[in-house]
Each structure stands twice: as structure tokens, then as C-alpha cells.
Amino acid sequence: MTPDGDSRFSASELLRPQVRPPWLASLVDNVERVPHAYRRRVPKEMLTALEGARSQAEAARSGRDAAVLVLFSGPDADHPVDLVPEAADLLLTVRAGSLRHHAGQAAFPGGAADPGDLGPVYTALREAREETGIDPARLYPLATLERMFIPPSGFHVVPVLAYSPDPGPVAVVDESETAVVARVPLRAFVNPANRIMVCRSGAERRYAGPAFLLNEMLVWGFTGHVISAMLDVAGWAQEWDTEDVRELDEAMALVGKNSEEPL
């Protein structure tokens, strides 16, 4: 696998959904349901506002194409399909606090498309390599999610689901862009004790969205929504307290104080 723009391959030819291990089958085989699960937790008025912002951006031909890598790692051996393997994890970063957009936020590795990229799969692999040092040759892209518009950054983002039985070492490559690179146990996201709802006071439209309070990061916003939706579609989600709503600043202050991350 290479993201270096080899014109012999199209983006669709890079997708290999058949490689997914049994425990990822329910997610990959139903990936078209993720956008619906995503929108289910967004209030109607916010969905209307987001759709309006997307339409305006497309009419003005503004915004940039982007992609993020949603990389699952874990065993490729047989495993009960309704259980998450203890060794399974999800690759995340925390963006540097000095960045203009989404500073200090937990995020999937990824970014804006370059002119030489042959579609979102190439963009996601290239950006992930630049941010985390991961070797794309060890990864198997499985599927792409629906293109989503992110108003704060103006990006039209395509999440790219991928799998690796062993992704190799990852680390911060450029401290001016990335503060943390981590392979977070997938069970940490499943654990109801780590799940809260986060809202931002002072925002033009105030609403709460799903978030994950972990030892190294607070995962919220777009990334939190995508992970929450994937848990629902995969059948991994456990009942959690959706009435536990925290202000963003309050939740961020709790990072590192949560002892419930492992399941």
C-alpha cells in the first residue's frame, strides 16, 4: 500500500473490505449506516444549520477536500463478533495547541488533500504517515464514509476506515502540529464509565454531543460523533448516561483524572 500518487491505482482499487477481521465485520459490512447513526445524536436545528453551511460552502466553491484515517488495529484471528478484542485499538492524535483550527483537540490523523492525491484514501494515508510516522504498507483501507462538512475549518472530510493486524511504531513527527499520538484501546470507548455528553457555552447554537473522557485526551466534536456512531453500528455500544452533560472546559479539566479508561 502506498499513498505516493502511483497512477496505476485508483482510490476504489485500494479498498479491501474482505481483509477485515471477524470482529470488524459488523461495522465494515454496515458502513453505510454510520452517517445515520451520526445524525441521530445531532439535534434537528443543528443538522439544519450544518446543511445550510455546507450548501453555502459548495455554492461559493469554498472549503477544502480532506480525509482522516480511522485505523483499527488488533488480532486477525477468529473472535466472537459481538465482542471487542482486548488487544484492539484505534489510532488518535491530539492536535497542537498552537494550530489555527481545532487546536488541542483529539482527532483522527488526517488533513487537507494535496493536488497529487488520487482521492481520499491517498490523502488519509499520506497525512497519517506525516503526522504519526506510520507505515502505510502495513495498513488495509476497508471503506470510506460519507463526505462530511466541518464548518469551523471549512473542510469537506471523508473518513477512511482501515485495519492493520500490526501497524508498527507510531509517534509524534512534528510537535508544531501534533501533541500526542496514541493507540487507544477500543474497549476504552466502549466502557460506559468513559462516556459523557459535552457542550460549549458561548457557542452560537448550544447543544451537547457524545464525548469520551480518557486518561490522555477528551474525544469530542466530529471525532467523538464518528466514534459513537461506529460503536452503535458495530453493536459494541453499551448503555451509558446521556444525561451526564459537561461544559467543554469542565470536561477538559478532568483529562488525566479518569481512572476508568481500561475496561
Image (spheres, grey):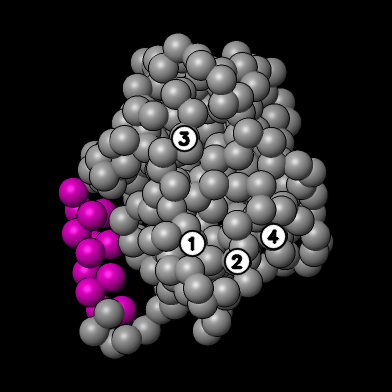
C-alpha distance separating marks 1 and 4: 12 Å
Q: Earlier in the sequence, mark 2 or mark 3?
A: 2
Indicate left or right for 58 with 138 as reference: left
Proximity of marks 2 and 4: CB atoms separated by less than 8 Å: yes
Say which residue appears at 44% left-offset and 24% top-offset: 22
Residue 129, numbered circle: 4
Q: Quadrant of the C terminus?
A: top right
Proximity of marks 1 and 2: CB atoms separated by less than 8 Å: yes
C-alpha distance separating marks 2 and 3: 20 Å
The residue nearer to you, when weighing 194 against 125, is 125
Q: Which residues are magenta?
A: 44-57
Image coordinates for residue 149, horizontal then vertical, percent: 35, 65
Predominant secondary structure, magenta span: helix
- What residue type is disc 2 on? Pro
Image coordinates for residue 199, horizontal then vertical, percent: 43, 43
Q: Earlier in the sequence, mark 3 or mark 1?
A: 3
Proximity of marks 1 and 4: CB atoms separated by less than 8 Å: no
- What residue type is disc 4 on? Arg
Say which residue appears at 54% left-offset and 47% top-offset: 140
C-alpha distance separating marks 3 and 1: 16 Å
Image coordinates for residue 258, horizontal then vertical, percent: 67, 23
Q: Nearer the viewer, mark 2 or mark 4?
A: 2
Residue 49 located within the stretch drawn in magenta: yes
C-alpha distance separating marks 1 and 2: 8 Å
Residue topped by disc 1: 121
Among the 4 quarters of the image, the one containing residue 47: bottom left
Residue topped by disc 3: 20
